[in-house]
Amino acid sequence: MAEADIAYVATAGAAGLAMAVSAWALLLRGRLKAAADAAERERAEALDSLGRHDAMLRAFDDVSLALTPDGRAAGAPIGSAELVARLAEEGDDVGAAVLAHLRQSHGALVDALVDQGQAFEGLTALDSVEPWRIEGRVAGGVAWLRLSPASRITLTGADATESGLAMLGDASPTPTWVVDGAGKLAWANRAWLTAINAESLDAAIESGLSFDRGADALVAEAARLGVRQEGFRWTTGGGARRAWRIIAEPAGGGAVTAFAIDVTEAEETRDTLRRHVEAHDETLNHLADAVAIFGPQKRLAFHNTAFQTLFDIDPAWLDERPTHAELLDRLRQRRSLPEVVDYAGWKAHELDFYGASEASPDDSWSLPDGRTLRVVRQPHPLGGILLIFSDITDELKLRSRFNAQIQVQRATLDKLNDAVAVFGSDGRLRLHNEAFETFWSLSAERIATASDFDALAELCKAVLPDPALWLGLKARVADPDPESRVAISGEGRTVDGRVAAWQTRPLPDGATLVAFSDVTARRGLEQALVQREQALAESQALKREFVGSVSYELRTPLTTIVGYSELLETMGELPERSRQHAGAIRVAASQLARSIDDVLDMAQIDAGEMELSLGDLRVRDLLVEAGEKVRARIEGRGATLGIVCPNDLKPIRADQHRIGQALDHLLENAARAVSDGGAVVLKAETGPSEIRLTVSDTGRGIPYHLQAHVFDRFVRRERGGPGVGLALVKALVELHGGWAEVESEPGKGAAFILHLPLGAATTAAAPELQLEL
């Protein structure tokens, strides 16, 4: 190809290339402008969306804070200016300050959000007004924290203000507090602060104060389990002890809202009620009547000890709270219910009492074992019924006996000759006998018309018109004063000349018994007896005078006889037989003189004129002296005389002559009783307050039928003639304050025992001789 062609082609190619480049440039410019316009539109839309989102974030009551990958605050928080201002002081880096506070309470959760994207929720205290809810989320590869006041979580619109739930919770009288996920106090109302004596929430948080350890444990348990927990605690503060019901409610993120409800009054009331119920139950357990209480469900709610004892039911079975129907069936099996033909109907009737609105009339059960029970049924204030069982078996028997006794009493009173009337404390006549009607000449109808004591007294005044008598009787009948209710008696004379004796007796039930009797014949007899007593006294005086005179007249010739007989015995010219006759005369005269002395002594004792000459009596010397007087006679009969007396026997206070006189009589009787080979023993024994002198022999003894009369006067005895010897012995011992007894077995001898006090207890001694030992 020629160069020209080449040049032409090159030029043509360059021109085409230039035209192609120009066309491509125009096309590229159009595309770039379209792209620029689209980008501008997208930028405008993004700015508009960003503005809307920012407005939206600032329109709600929460604050959002973005975090950088290394866990720092990515700028300032986004949200309501009011809330942002509450989060930090003016001039501070709000984002950094909020994050630093959150790391103190939720540091681990924040780190887990940044590093692992793990979301969380919780509560924290960012200011002193109320707790804040914190939420952690990851969006667009960025970790976000959302903060909102707890009081505004559920509020929207214009109600979402600071005066919402926070003010309501703060004004609540119930202590309320919030614990965050770390277990630290996040918020508390004014009642909680008052309860723990804290000035402010910050002061409570700074001091680490808590409501109660038990409440803290309950809150921790609710946070751990995520389940609502309730408990009961007693606290002491301000000088008072209070009861609280603690409620711990999980709020998410490990936070817990706790409430302390004051139940002191309810607990005190419950405690008072419990003590009242216990005292009531204890009181019922001390009752003799059986008590059973069934609840509204017809189950046994309570029974006292007497109930179990009355029916002899196993206590363990009763503790299982059987139903009323089951209890009736068990009692029927044990034959502790009345025997009825239609048990099912009877049982249904018993259970119908649950629908009663008031107590039913008392009922009685006659049991097969012979017991009778009184049954009381009444509605229980708390529902169900209360049953009271009383064993009235003994009461019925007592009432029957009482009625029988009353009938016997009436029949007895009717058989009395005395007129008897019984007046009640109200002055009305309760009962009277037939003799009362006869005594006052009144019919039963007229007595029945007398309504009280005054009316009856008016009827009786026709027979015994003594106003003072009836006034005194009325005081005894109607006056309740104890000084007036005393037994009195007196006499009066009726209009027909009878002598009427009356007497009153207060009765235990407040009644008064008044009895009238006709003592006319008795007074006449008493007058006759008085006259005879006077005559007897005169005859006794004449007898004593006669005895004294006769004794004196007899003693004088006896003295002469004794003297001349002794003289004849000493004369040597008389034959032996004549001297024996003279001795017999002397012995008989001496015995007669002694009998006369005994009679005179008895007369003195009867007249109360004998006086004792008391002194220190040596018993041993007295026994020896008395024994020597009769020793010759006893030994002459072939018997022996023994004297037994302790050497250390102390003297006693007594009349030596009179005690010796008593021993002489006993020894003479013993001497007459013994025979050849016999024995007489004179013995002294001492006791704590007396000395016993015993004269025993081995003679014939005394028949049993005569032993009771051996000390009587002028009774003929087989072992002695008529006389007063033993009677005088008894009288002399009794003058000393002692007594005498006899012990004898026929055929084996007799023993007479004199019991003498160590110091004579007598009034028969001369005054100057009555000395205290």
Image: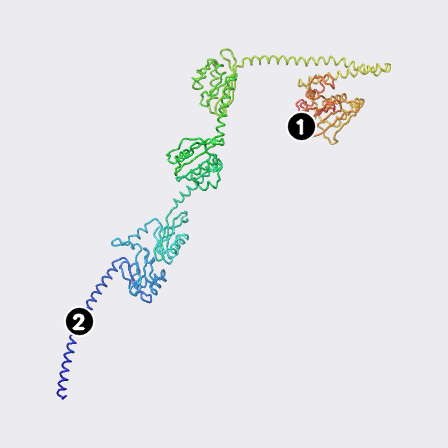
* Residue positioned most to the bottom: 2
* Residue positioned most to the right: 573
* Quadrant of the rendering where the N terminus is positioned: bottom left
Q: Quadrant of residue 551?
A: top right
Is residue 307 or residue 615 the one in the foreground? 307
Give the crowd class for mark 2: few <14, some 14-19, many >=20 residues within 10 Å. few
Residue 568: which numbered mark, if any? none
Give the crowd class for mark 1: few <14, some 14-19, many >=20 residues within 10 Å. few
Depth check, mark 1 against mark 2: the one in front is 2
Q: Is residue 171 above or below residue 699?
A: below
* Quadrant of the rendering where the C terminus is positioned: top right
Q: Amino acid at mark 1?
A: Glu
Q: Amino acid at mark 2?
A: Lys
Label 2 sits on a secondary structure element that is: helix
Q: Is residue 314 left or right of residue 744?
A: left
Measured from the top left, where is residue 473 in percent x and y? 48, 19
Q: Residue at x 70, y 22 (%)?
A: 704
Q: Quadrant of residue 114?
A: bottom left
Label 1 sits on a secondary structure element that is: loop
Is residue 230 or residue 334 the one in the foreground? 334
CA separation in Å, label 1 and label 2: 162 Å
Residue that label 1 marks = 772
Residue that label 2 marks = 33
Q: Residue at x 66, y 19 (%)?
A: 608
Is residue 364 or residue 527 the one in the foreground? 364
Q: Is residue 743 left or right of residue 153?
A: right
Measured from the top left, where is residue 86 in percent x and y? 30, 58
Measured from the top left, where is residue 459 in percent x and y? 45, 15
